[in-house]
Amino acid sequence: MRKLTLFALALILFACKHPEARQPVSVKTGTFIDNSVERNKKLNAKEQASIEKLMKQQPENYIASENGFWYFYNNKVASDSLKTPNFGDQITYNYTVKALNGTVIYSSEELKTQTYIMDQQELFTGLREGLKLMKAGETITFLFPSQKAYGYYGDAKKIFRNTPIICQVTVNSIIKNQTN
């Protein structure tokens, strides 16, 4: 009986062990994000160099916007009576899209006259910010790096991913929103 008691006691002591933490099957280290950041920095530097090279080859006085693109006026309206658009204003404009080498991607005939309600409709970032700088009757040429244009995906038609573009934009009219 004594052996049986010792055996039961030993069984109880050794059978009741604490749960052990399991090690994860795979360990995520964040290397994908780190690699993506590095890739984007290199892409941005490459695009920046291409755009700067283009600007040096052309005699125009480019202006660096605080939104990450460059532009120059083909036709500037000096009148102070004309205002730039605000939220909700309706803008009609024409534009062309070119690659940095000057090849026309979309002509103004292809794109036709566009109507845009400021900040209330879908438009790529660079053009949306560029239209805010313009008055009716002005023509501006913009140099957009890919992240301000169609970015990683392109436009799924003629503009490939990570493509910096040149847009020449003419604002035909600005109709002020009456509720402002």
Image (spheres, rainbow, N blue to C red):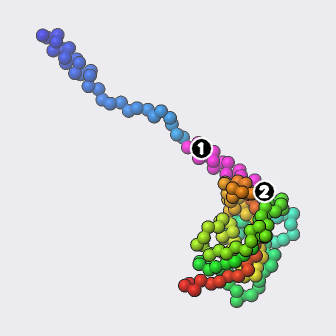
Q: Which residue matches tag 2?
A: 49
Residue type at mark 2: give it: Ala
Among the two numbered marks 2 and 1 on one chain, the one whose residue lies closer to the N terminus: 1
Name the spot of residue 82 as percent of width and height, x first.
70, 86
Q: What element carries label 2?
A: helix
> What residue sits 86% from the left and 66% below the top?
58
Quadrant holding the N terminus = top left
* Residue range (magenta): 30-50
Specify few, some or many for label 2: CA neighbours under 10 Å numbering under 14, 14-19, or 20 or more. Answer: few
2 vs 1, front mark: 1
Residue type at mark 1: give it: Phe
Which of the 4 quarters of the picture holds residue 5? top left
> What residue sits 65% from the left and 74% below the top?
116
Which of the labelled discs sits on residue 32, or is there none? 1
Q: Is mark 1 on a helix, strand or loop?
A: helix
Residue 134 in the figure: left or right of residue 28: right
Residue 7 in the figure: left or right of residue 32: left
**Residue 158 or 97: which is nearer the viewer?**
158
Residue 55 in the figure: left or right of residue 36: right
Up-down: is 146 above or below 17? below
Up-down: is 72 above or below 84? above
Asked whether residue 48 is drawn in magenta, I would say yes
